Image: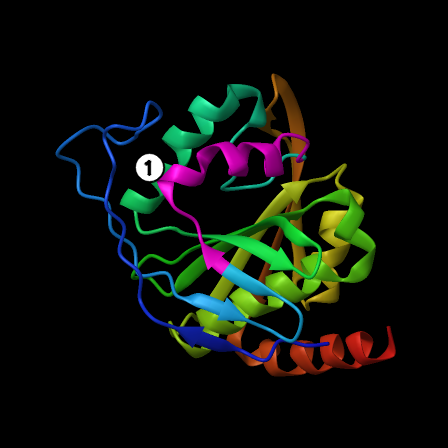
Amino acid sequence: MGPRLEASGDVGYSVDHSHPLTWPPRGHKVRTMAPTLRSERLTLIPAELRQSGQLWRLVRTAPAIEGFPDPGTGPEGVARWLGGALAEGTQVWIIRSAGGLSGLVTAAMPDSGVASVGYYVEEACSERGVAAEALCTAVSWLFEKRGAHRVELRVAAGSTALWRVAQQAGFALEGVARESWRWGGVWHDARSYALLRRDWAAARRRVEVAGAAA
């Protein structure tokens, strides 16, 4: 099913410095305004610093995705990444489906009106349309609630399942940058996609039709 966008509450984050993986350092204020988002089957829950271990377990097998931590850095690296992301105002959601925690979605939107997203779901959920639904839910929020004009994403060229999700959601391929992305100690080609506000309504209808037929 397509996204039925519901957003509940702005959420602020405080840092528990008793946690061994705390980042950023003491005195650095961390605050984001990520709401909980809901679609037909999913709930996107704002991630918290204390969940760094859970996040690492979710992304430890992830391919190269823009805005995501390199799982090779371990739980400590994920904690640093999450703290830095929240401090910069990047939204980080954990995807909850009927089967439990399924993956992550990130969204960053500077004042320019050009946003960027990243997404990943565990392999067991990849054939149930979870990634497409989660991506469309975050994109709906960016266009409808945050006033985005353009949403961009990049994935490794070899991550076929991920870039097919982008195409299903209406994103247009704008180019391939050869060996522009270092991930896991390896240089990857990166596929760049974008979706404009004016194209979103038509793309959303296609996703809803595909979801209803699944």
Give the vertical position of 208 relative to 62 (above or below): below
Q: Which residues are magenta?
A: 45-62
Give the vertical position of 101 relative to 186 (above or below): below
Count every numbered label the image shows and give the total: 1
Residue with the mark numbered 1: 84
Is 214 positioned to the left or the right of 198 in the image? Answer: right
Q: Quadrant of residue 211?
A: bottom right
Residue nearest the observer in this picture, 118 or 178 = 118
Residue at position x 51%, y 20% in the image = 73
Q: Residue furthest top?
A: 185
Q: Residue furthest right?
A: 213
Q: x, y percentage for residue 188?
A: 66, 29
Label 1: element kind: helix
Is 60 contained in the magenta span? yes
Is 120 positioned to the left or the right of 159 in the image? Answer: left
Q: x, y percentage for residue 75?
A: 48, 25
